[in-house]
Image (spheres, helix red, strand yellow):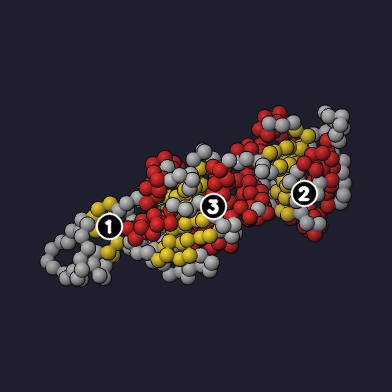
Amino acid sequence: MKKNVLLCVTGGIAVFKAAALTSKLVQNGFNVKVAMTKSATEFVTPLTFQALSRDRVYTNTFEEADPTKISHIDVADWADIVMVAPATANIIGKVANGIADDMVSTVLLKTTAPVFIAPAMNVHMYEHPAVQKNMETLRSYGYSFVEPNEGYLACGYEGKGRMAEPEDLLLKIQHFFYKQTNAVWQGKKIIVTAGPTRENIDPVRFFTNRSSGKMGYAIAEEAATRGADVTLISGPTNLQPPNQVEFVSVESANDMYEAVMENFGDADIVIKAAAVADYRPKQTYDQKMKKREGEWTIEMERTADILKTMGEKRTHQTLVGFAAESENIEMYAKGKLEKKRVDMICANSITEPGSGFQGDTNELVLYKKTGDVIHIPMTQKVEAAKSILDATMNIHMERQQ
Ligand code: CTP
């Protein structure tokens, strides 16, 4: 069922990001209503939010469009979650001290839904002991904060105070609901592939790549934690298979192809995080090749594209692929979406520090077939796995509607 998000917008330059968040929430299947303070309307007009949310915008406690309802009570009850973005020092101070003198502060005191607050202000205001104390008070009342980022602030300062990006706020909201509804994962059959493949030349030599398997293992572990029935098909890695997953160890692209196809029929979701070799030596020698004078040329042939084959054969399955690129990330990722007929490509830049193979962190952009794009900022692979699974389940549920 669609969830109801009440977005409370207060006055700061980051109001424009709240407009982007409204659009993203609607695109991701949420019902959105917006309440604005008077100062917020100085930055962006209510009409913008009305058009993006396709609903009236709440700005004035005394403007009662429907005489059968009291709008600030009604909208506060309607919300499954409230996001205050941007949140000024003023609104934080008001709510912490029980002041309700406009639409947003009244709704915030009335609602019993969980409230997330995304502060945006000058670094010195943010660090002011009064603001910090008010935030502490709100935390003690059960409010959650989405920390601002460090960087260039509209006032010309550099520091902590930039509101979190709309994509991050969307993910926070999605995480919240998926945590509540982990039940959707119960018993879902999921195949995750991970690691590199190894293409033998002779008994001692092989071709492989730098994939560590960490991203795929993190996805498999998280999916199992959420209650899914996970089969992890992995090339050679140094990692310990996670508990609660069915582990299938493979070596070559061909082994992986066979293992995936064996499990594909009754899978609900396939996530192909493996870095599968695209080529293998045409000839594999049974005995170790001895060195000789002159050059040694190894002829290579294409391996089967496992993901593409699944894209052609699929019926009910949701398919997610990965793309590790060193340039033109968006163009190549979107190309793979089309060519492999999958629902989402998780793209990362292998040249970006902290992203891609080997490390514990990753920065990814998820390109959905629907055209939606989700940016996962640099984070631990374990955290990125959660976002990838949230986005995947979102697609899976939409496909079933
Ligand atoms: N993949 C696959 N089988 C292959 C090669 C790739 O299933 N033989 C899957 C990977 O697991 C990944 C996605 O396809 O999910 C993208 O892999 P990648 O190697 O980046 O893309 P290619 O289509 O091989 O394109 P290129 O090598 O030109 O970038």
Position of the C terminus, as image quadrant, is top right
- The structure residue drawn at horizontal position 56% and vertical position 57%, both measured from the top left corner, is 187
The reply to whether discs 2 and 3 touch (Cβ–Cβ < 8 Å) is no
Q: Is mark 2 within 8 Å of ligand 1?
A: no
Report the residue marked by disc 3: 388
Identify residue for label 1: 280
Q: Please name the amino acid that badge 1 sits on.
A: Arg
* Place of residue 356 in the rendered image (x, y in percent of width and height, measured from the top left): 45, 56
> Disc 3 versus disc 1: distance between alpha carbons?
30 Å
Task: Please give the name of the residue rendered at 81% of the width and 46% of the height, measured from the top-left corner.
Answer: 111
Q: Can I make out residue 125 in this image?
A: no
Residue 310 percent location from the top left of the image: 40, 48
Mark 1 to mark 2: distance in Å?
A: 56 Å
- Report the Cα–Cα distance between label 2 and label 3: 26 Å
To which residue does mark 2 refer?
113
Image coordinates of residue 330 in percent, x first then y, are 45, 43
- Mark closest to the chain's N terminus, 2 or 3: 2
Ligand 1 lies under 8 Å from the Cβ of mark 1: no
Residue 186, by quadrant, is bottom right
- SS category of the residue bearing label 2: loop
**C-beta proximity under 8 Å, tags 3 and 1:** no
> The residue tagged with tag 1: helix, strand or loop?
strand
Q: Do the residues labelled 1 and 2 touch (CB within 8 Å)?
A: no
**In the image, is residue 69 above or below residue 106?**
above
Q: Tell me if mark 2 has few (under 14), some (14-19) or many (20+) residues whose alpha carbon lies within 10 angstroms of its own.
A: some
**Rendering coords of residue 307 (x, y %):** 40, 50
Kind of residue indicated by mark 2: Ala
Q: Mark 1 or 2 closer to N-term?
A: 2
